[in-house]
Image (spheres, helix red, strand yellow):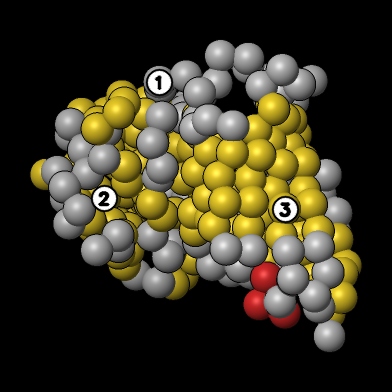
Amino acid sequence: DTEVTQTPKHLVMGMTNKKSLKCEQHMGHRAMYWYKQKAKKPPELMFVYSYEKLSINESVPSRFSPECPNSSLLNLHLHALQPEDSALYLCASSPLNQGFQETQYFGPGTRLLVL
Amino acid sequence: RKEVEQDPGPFNVPEGATVAFNCTYSNSASQSFFWYRQDCRKEPKLLMSVYSSGNEDGRFTAQLNRASQYISLLIRDSKLSDSATYLCVVPSGNTGKLIFGQGTTLQVKP
């Protein structure tokens, strides 16, 4: 089962709202990632968690707050977003059997619209 | 020079055609390489991994040329369902960061 699930599929929020995106994998992968993708652009890395610890923050604004409650779950808490934050947010995971040189498996994404 | 560079296309080809995409990378120490396929409004999905000189899976062949630092993807007997964006992806060392090319768009027409 090479499946990463994400909820919700779509999210519309105002600039004063607080919402959370959720990601789950049951493949026993020890690394999980958040990406942001704008239309006609490749995904941009936001955060990397390895063994449930944050290992990379790509200078993401503090209005995005990641959380890794356990090895299967990854959340992204959103607060006071801007319209330019509207994008497809992708979660991914990888095994870490051979370090970070392995394939990452992507979830279907959450399409976020900030009004 | 960009870390990973692809010709964005679009490549418009008829069904049954053979099409090849090239991708160049700047880090000569890179050890693994991936081709992902992304359909419109969907997530990237792994198409092929390349760890040595190349890999073949049915109609798809990926070749690695370390001396020239490029990876190619060859699609034979193109199908309408092959229409998608193809992303060349190279891990950035052992950091967890993937470097994506800009993607190459393929349109296969009847």
Q: Quadrant of the N terminus of chain A?
A: bottom left
Instruction: Pick the residue in front: B24 or A36.
Output: B24
Residue A17 seen anywhere in this rendered image of the structure = no
Q: Around disc 3, counting alpha carbons within 10 Å, would you say few (fewer than 14), some (14 to 19), or many (20 or more)?
A: some
Work out whether residue B65 can be spotted: yes
Q: Residue B24 lies in what quarter of the image?
A: top right
Q: Chain of mark 3?
A: B
Give the residue number, with chain letter if any, for mark 2. A75
Q: Helix or strand or loop: what does disc 2 sit on?
A: strand
1 and 2 marks in contact (CB < 8 Å): no
Specify the quadrant of the image occupied by residue B39: bottom right
Q: Chain of mark 2?
A: A
Total marks shown come to 3
**Amino acid on which the number 3 mark rests in the picture:** Leu
Give left or right: position of A39 versus A32: right
Residue sitting at the far top: B29
Residue at numbered disc 3:
B74
- Comparing A41 with A31, the one in front is A31
Residue A68 point in image, percent of width and height: 19, 42
Label 1, label 3: how many angstroms apart (C-alpha)?
Answer: 28 Å
Q: Quadrant of residue A98?
A: top left
Circle 1 residue: B94
- Left or right: where B18 falls relative to A66: right
Upstream in sequence: badge 1 or badge 3: 3
- Name the residue rendered at 36%, 41% in the picture: A33
